[in-house]
Image (cartoon, grey):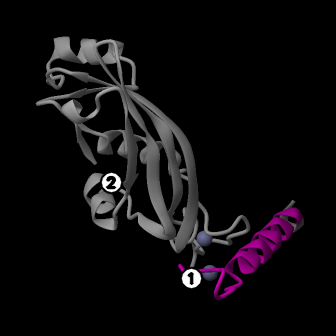
């Protein structure tokens, strides 16, 4: 995912596939997998002013955990990418640098030693693309909060029982009054 700026010249076509190992290393907070189609960035790096502009599209499919039942959920990705890479020091974590970082647009990434790593742009897009509410299917019934079973596989009836209990409770109250 690294490109030497001396190879870019007037412009360089970029085509990168995301590997499962890279995903695990770059997005450790999410247990993500790849679909058969995988995820690929296709675009072009071009010199602009002081830096280099990467423009392209990240597309493919990821497998995340369903927010309701934790089973695999497929997330389709189709995101335009536009990032400017500028050579310079990585912003250090000091108060002054923090202010500076806040003023820096999100789509500017620093690079060093004449090597641009487009992986960072890919990671940012992937993190934006994973909806926190990824679901395995729109009508996923999720995990039962009472007995913990996957209600897609084993309808447990806890909810029905809870409903009946609360109805009985309501009736009891009415009788008391
Ligand atoms: Zn689900
Ligand atoms: Zn249950």
Give residue 48's quadrant in the image. Answer: top left
Taking the view exactly as shown, the residue that stands out farthest to the front is: 10
Along the viewing direction, whichever of 150 and 63 lies nearer the viewer: 63
Give residue 142's quadrant in the image. Answer: bottom right
**Vertical relation: 165 (above or below) 54:** below
**Vertical relation: 21 (above or below) 153:** above
Q: Is residue 108 left or right of residue 132?
A: left
Along the viewing direction, whichever of 151 and 84 lies nearer the viewer: 84
Q: Main secondary structure of the magenta part?
A: helix
Query: What residue did someone put label 1 on?
Result: 149
| Label at residue 27 | 2
Point out residue 105 in the picture as x, y percentages from the top left corner: 39, 18
Q: How many marks do you count on the picture?
A: 2
Along the viewing direction, whichever of 160 and 7 lies nearer the viewer: 7
Other-residue count near label 1 (Cα within 10 Å), few / some / many at <14 / 14–19 / ≥20:
some
Residues in magenta? Answer: 148-174
């Amino acid at each position: 995912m690294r490109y030497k700026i001396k190879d870019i010249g007037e412009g360089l076509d970029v085509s990168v596939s995301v590997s499962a190992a890279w995903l695990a290393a770059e997005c450790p907070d999410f247990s993500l997998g790849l679909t058969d189609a995988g995820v690929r960035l296709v675009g072009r790096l071009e010199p602009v002013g002081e830096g280099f502009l990467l423009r392209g599209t990240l597309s493919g499919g990821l497998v995340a955990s369903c927010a309701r039942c934790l089973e695999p959920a497929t997330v389709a990705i189709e995101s335009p990418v536009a990032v400017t890479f500028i050579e310079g020091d990585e912003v250090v974590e000091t108060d002054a640098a923090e202010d500076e970082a806040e003023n820096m647009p999100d789509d500017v990434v620093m690079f060093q030693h004449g090597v641009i790593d487009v992986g960072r742009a890919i990671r940012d897009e992937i993190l934006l693309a994973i909806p926190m509410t990824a679901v395995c299917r729109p009508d996923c019934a999720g995990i039962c909060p009472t007995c913990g079973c996957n209600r897609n596989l084993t309808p447990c009836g806890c909810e029905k029982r809870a409903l009946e209990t609360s109805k009985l409770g309501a009736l009891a109250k009415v009788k008391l009054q």
